[in-house]
Image (spheres, grey):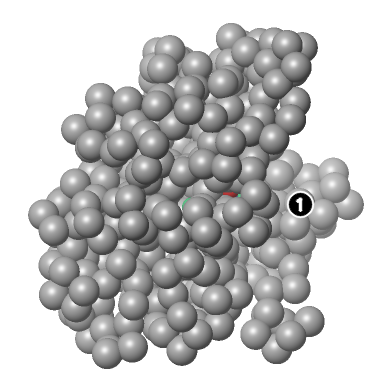
């Protein structure tokens, strides 16, 4: 491995899922659901295969899906993307992220990440030969907020891009309009490109509202918006995502994308188009189910003695292990499968400043109730 990729040899998700297998543990580590998406969506994919939709789709993605993505963003957020020039179908959000960074960042540029950050951002920055700078979320009672002063201080003449993720993996934070406005002001003032990862856009709880960064003043022309079918339709294995943005930026992302994968899987595309167009009620049920599952797991963690943080969205809730007398989340998570048969992920796997995040653990609640209840029973004996 070349030096710049050496830190990325394995991912925390693969490591923790392997431990789950070894100890037959309840896997609350890697974020993937254990139920299928809308039945009609699955059928449309089967029909697509049966009807011979098995060769390369068009480079930017099948028109039916690009139109469905543009219509969806218009309907829900009032955003205006031309499906022919401003929407690009990708192999999951992951490819959209890597292709965006590779296409728009030069070696030597700085990219701002908000810490903790989803691991793929740091790897994409390294692939591009750029340098990441992190801006921390800070604890405010039982929630996390953006340190806006640190954001302003982190910008240098070399800063080219900022990556934003809301709803936020791993903390479950949903940025307020005020936080997003602060990010937008910094981006405009310093002429930064914004990459906004909105894969959990539909999974927000209580009265939280998802505000797309690109809808804020000055942002539409400088933002690549990334999302995916994975979390909205319980289809993490379909690897069907997209990037939306102004035509010149999307053209650049397409240039990189066509040499990463060329195109994505054809039969998934009409199926995801169907889901975006027709499965709004199914997604609303998913959202309310997940909210209830968040409550179930959060209550179990509180009763077990963890210091539980607020989760306003995503699949995840974070909990502090300091009240249990523990001091090292990484060691705690490596021991947990053998100790009580539960897998979770240490948040310090998503950070550069481990000392600030050393006692925080991420638990996934995107699991069937019986799995969560089994996990809850095991967690009760953690002390
Ligand atoms: N971004 C975030 C914040 C994620 O949590 C994930 C993984 N689930 C992804 C991107 C990757 O999405 P996809 O599977 O569509 O590549
Ligand atoms: N996004 C999922 C998570 O955060 C896992 C994706 C992966 O395994 N890379 O758990």
The residue drawn where x is 40% and y is 31% is 69
Residue 4 image point, x, y percent: 65, 85
- The vertical placement of 29 against 351, above or below, is above
Q: Is residue 368 visible?
A: no
Pick the front one: 291 or 111: 111
| 243 and 13: which is toward the camera | 243
- Based on the displayed image, in which of its 4 quarters is residue 15 positioned? bottom right
- In the picture provided, is 233 more to the left or to the right than 217? right
Residue 197: percent from the left, percent from the top?
41, 52
Q: Indicate the position of residue 45 as horizontal and vertical percent values.
A: 66, 18
The C terminus lies in quadrant: bottom right
Q: Residue at x 25, y 77 (%)?
A: 151
Q: On screen, 343 above or below 222?
A: above
Residue drawn at the location 63% of the way across and 27% of the way down: 268
Which residue position is annotated with label 1? 17
Q: Is residue 114 left or right of residue 13?
A: left
Q: Is residue 313 left or right of residue 362?
A: left
In the image shown, does 318 or 77 lie closer to the viewer?
A: 77
Q: In the image, is the residue at mark 1 within 8 Å of ligand 2 by its beta carbon?
A: yes
10 Å neighbourhood of mark 1: few (<14), some, or many (≥20)?
Answer: some
Q: Position of residue 342 (x, y in %)?
A: 71, 48
Closer to us: 379 or 85 = 85
């Amino acid at each position: 491995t070349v030096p710049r990729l050496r830190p990325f040899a394995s991912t925390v998700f693969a490591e923790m899922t392997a431990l789950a297998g070894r100890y037959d543990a309840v896997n609350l580590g890697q974020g993937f659901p254990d139920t299928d998406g809308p039945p009609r969506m699955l059928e449309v994919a089967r029909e697509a295969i049966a009807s011979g939709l098995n060769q390369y789709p068009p480079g930017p993605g099948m028109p039916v899906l690009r139109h469905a993505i543009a219509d969806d963003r218009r309907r829900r957020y009032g955003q205006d993307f031309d499906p022919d020039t401003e929407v690009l179908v990708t192999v999951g959000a992951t490819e959209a992220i890597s292709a965006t960074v590779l296409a728009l960042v030069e070696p030597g540029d700085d990219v701002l990440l908000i810490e903790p950050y989803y691991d793929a951002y740091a790897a994409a920055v390294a692939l591009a030969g750029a340098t990441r700078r992190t801006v921390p979320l800070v604890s405010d009672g039982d929630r996390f907020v953006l340190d806006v002063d640190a954001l302003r201080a982190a910008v240098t003449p070399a800063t080219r891009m900022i990556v934003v993720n809301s709803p936020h993996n791993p903390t479950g934070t949903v940025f307020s309009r005020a936080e997003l406005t602060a990010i937008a002001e910094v981006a405009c003032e310093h002429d930064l490109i914004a990459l906004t990862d909105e894969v959990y856009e539909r999974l927000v709880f209580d009265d939280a509202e998802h505000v797309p960064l690109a809808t804020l003043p000055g942002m539409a022309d400088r933002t690549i918006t990334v999302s995916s079918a994975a979390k909205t339709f319980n289809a993490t294995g379909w690897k069907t995502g997209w990037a939306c943005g102004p035509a010149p930026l999307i053209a650049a992302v397409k240039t990189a994308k066509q040499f990463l994968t060329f195109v994505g899987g054809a039969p998934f595309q009409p199926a995801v188009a169907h889901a975006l167009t027709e499965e709004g009620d199914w997604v609303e049920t998913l959202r309310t189910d997940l909210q209830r599952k968040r409550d179930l797991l959060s209550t179990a963690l509180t009763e077990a003695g963890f210091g539980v943080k607020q989760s306003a969205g995503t699949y995840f809730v974070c909990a502090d292990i300091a009240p249990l007398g523990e001091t090292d989340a990484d060691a705690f998570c490596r021991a947990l499968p053998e100790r009580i048969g539960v897998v979770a992920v240490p948040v310090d796997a998503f950070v550069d400043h481990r000392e600030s995040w050393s006692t925080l653990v991420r638990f996934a609640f995107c699991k069937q109730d019986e799995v969560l209840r089994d996990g809850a029973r095991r967690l009760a004996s953690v002390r």
